[in-house]
Image (cartoon, grey):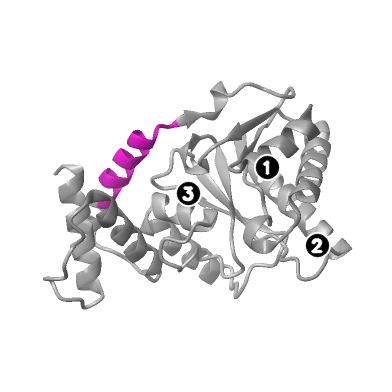
C-alpha cells in the first residue's frame, strides 16, 4: 500500500466501526483526507482494534513521521550544560520522552482536529495511546488525574520512546500560589519519572499556557527554576529540552536561559 491507500483503508475502517455508510464521500484531496482521518481518530473511544488496522496505521504514521522529519534531541545544541531550547513540533522529537500537557481525564483531546498538543500527540502516536491511558487509569483506579502529577506510557508511533502525561493548573481569574505550586509539581513529577525510568532525555512543552491561561513568562520562569534545581541535585545526567512553538515563548526562554 502507498500512503493514499493506507489513508483510505483507515478512514473506511473507522467509518465502518461507527456504523457509517461505506459510500461516505471522501474529500478528493490528500489534505482533506488527512483531516478526516485525524478527526475520526480523535473522536474514537479507547477500545481494542484489529491487528490489520494497527499494521496499516503504524506504517501510515511512521511514514508521516519520516515526511515531517525526525529531530534527534541528542544533536540539539546545549544552551546550558544539560539544557537545550528547540522551537518546533514536539511530535518530531526523538528523545527519551516528550511531555504531554494532558487534561484531567487523561484520555487525550476528543475535539476533532483541535490545535492543542494533547490532540497532536494522540493523533501521531496512534489509537493505541488512548487505550493505554484508559488501561492505566483502570489499573490505578483513577477517575481523574490531579494537577501536578505525571504518568508514563509508551509513545507507540512517535519518534520518542515514552510520553509523560501531566495535568497543569487552569488559571481562572489570577495566578494563585496553588497554581504556581501545581505547575512546579508538573515539572518535578515528569523529571522524577524520567529519572526513575533511566531516560536520557525529556522534552517539555509549555505546560498550562495557551488553553489553561497560565501567563507565558511566569510559567517559563517556574519551568526554568524547577528544572535547574532538579538538575543541580540529580545523581545522573539528564538532557532537558524546552520545546516551544510560538515566537513569544522562544523569546522568553532565550532571555531566561541566557
Q: Tell me the CA gap for discs 1 and 2.
A: 22 Å
Q: Is residue 235 left or right of residue 104?
A: right
- Looking at the rendered structure, the secondary structure element under dot 1 is helix
Please tell me in which quadrant of the rendered image residue 33 appears: bottom left
Image coordinates of residue 171 in percent, x first then y, are 75, 66
Residue stretch rendered in magenta on the structure? 57-70
Q: Tell me the CA gap for discs 2 and 3.
A: 28 Å
- Tell me, yes or no, whether the two marked residues, 1 and 2, touch with CB atoms within 8 Å: no
Determine if the magenta segment contains residue 67.
yes
Q: What residue is shown at x 23% (from left), y 49% (from top)? A: 30
Residue annotated with mark 2:
179
Front residue of this view, candidates 254 and 117 = 254
Front residue of this view, candidates 133 and 35 = 35
User: Mark 3 or mark 1: which comes first in sequence?
Assistant: 3
User: Mark 1 or mark 2: which comes first in sequence?
Assistant: 2
Residue annotated with mark 1:
248
Front residue of this view, candidates 121 and 190 = 121
Instruction: Judge the density around disc 3: few (<14), some (14-19), many (≥20) Cα neighbours within 10 Å.
Output: some
Q: Tell me the CA gap for discs 3 and 1.
A: 31 Å
Amino acid at each position: 500500500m502507498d500512503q493514499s491507500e493506507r489513508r483510505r483503508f483507515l478512514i473506511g475502517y473507522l467509518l465502518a466501526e461507527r456504523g457509517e455508510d461505506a459510500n461516505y464521500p471522501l474529500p478528493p484531496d490528500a489534505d482533506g483526507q488527512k483531516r478526516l482521518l485525524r478527526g475520526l481518530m480523535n473522536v474514537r473511544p479507547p477500545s481494542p482494534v484489529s491487528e490489520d488496522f494497527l499494521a496499516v496505521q503504524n506504517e501510515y504514521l511512521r511514514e508521516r513521521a519520516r515526511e515531517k522529519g525526525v529531530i534527534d534531541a541528542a544533536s540539539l545544541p546545549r544552551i546550558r550544560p544539560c539544557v537545550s531550547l528547540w522551537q518546533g513540533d514536539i511530535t518530531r522529537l526523538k528523545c527519551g520522552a516528550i511531555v504531554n500537557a494532558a487534561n484531567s481525564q487523561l484520555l487525550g483531546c476528543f475535539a476533532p482536529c483541535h490545535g492543542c498538543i494533547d490532540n497532536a500527540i494522540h493523533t501521531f502516536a496512534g489509537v493505541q495511546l488512548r487505550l493505554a491511558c484508559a488501561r492505566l487509569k483502570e489499573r490505578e483506579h483513577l477517575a481523574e488525574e490531579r494537577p501536578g502529577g505525571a504518568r508514563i506510557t509508551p509513545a507507540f508511533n512517535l519518534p520518542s520512546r515514552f510520553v509523560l502525561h501531566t495535568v497543569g493548573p487552569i488559571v481562572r481569574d489570577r495566578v494563585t500560589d496553588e497554581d504556581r505550586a501545581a505547575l512546579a509539581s508538573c515539572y518535578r513529577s515528569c523529571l522524577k519519572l524520567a529519572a526513575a525510568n533511566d531516560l536520557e532525555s525529556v522534552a517539555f512543552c509549555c505546560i498550562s499556557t495557551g488553553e489553561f491561561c497560565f501567563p507565558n513568562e511566569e510559567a517559563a520562569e517556574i519551568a526554568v527554576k524547577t528544572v535547574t534545581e532538579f538538575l543541580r541535585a540529580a545523581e545522573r545526567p539528564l538532557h532537558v529540552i524546552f520545546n516551544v512553538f510560538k515566537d513569544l515563548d522562544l523569546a522568553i526562554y532565550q532571555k531566561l536561559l541566557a
